[in-house]
Image (cartoon, grey):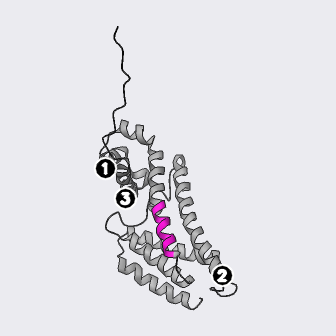
Amino acid sequence: MGIETPRTGRPRAFDEETVLDRATEVFWRYGYEGASLSALTSAMGINRPSLYATFGSKEQLFQRAFTRYHETQVANARAALDQPTARAAIEAFLRSSADGLTADDHPAGCLSIQGGLACSPENTRISKILAAGRAATESALEERLALAAQEGDLPQGMDARALARFVMALSEGHAVHAAAGASREDLHASIDIALRALAAQL
């Protein structure tokens, strides 16, 4: 009776981060519900068994993709907010966002908006994940503006939370327009107007 040697698992023939980036683009372009498993596996260059073995399920794949995307977005937002004044931080945040929304290396717009703003009842978890991501970015903005208020860099009585919500609403509105074809110049022109309006308040 021969001695059996332990079988080792076959190494994956793909780079996990690369296929995750490809999945992110599909979700970004079609939203969670619009991204079929066929479209995902085709873009990722893997079959369904490999997708399930590596990522678990379509929902778990989306969670991984959005976490990766959101970490990058939050890092960019925090870098933009690292400015010496509240007005400069707001401008850097909005302009950086506009540039990201219209970049050529990914679909136009924002994954957190297009991914699943509205979902069927069985996919409400997706909408909640995306809402939590947007809330985290807004919290980072509010934190920066609250610090500005403490330092006397905002007018007395200015509501940092309301100001953060205003800035986020503009940025998220830009995401919708970018996805519909608005150019980078269009978005920056809108930011110019918003900054002039804020100048009267700040």
- Residue 94's x, y, as percent? 47, 77
- Residue 59's x, y, as percent? 47, 46
16 vs 96, nearest the viewer: 16
171 vs 64, nearest the viewer: 64
Q: Nearer the viewer, mark 1 or mark 3?
A: 1
Q: Which residue is mark 1?
A: 43
Q: Please indicate whether residue 148 sits to the left or right of residue 93 in the image.
A: right
> What residue appears at the point 36 percent right and 17 percent down from the top-left corner?
4
> What residue appears at the point 62 percent right and 81 percent down from the top-left corner?
148
Q: Nearer the viewer, mark 1 or mark 2?
A: 2
Q: Which residue is mark 3?
A: 29
> What residue appears at the point 65 percent right and 88 percent down from the top-left corner?
155
| CA neighbours of label 2 inside 10 A, class few (<14), some (14 to 19), many (20+) | some
Mark 1 vs 3, N-terminal side: 3
Q: Residue furthest top?
A: 1
Residue 89 badge: none
Amino acid bearing label 2: Ala
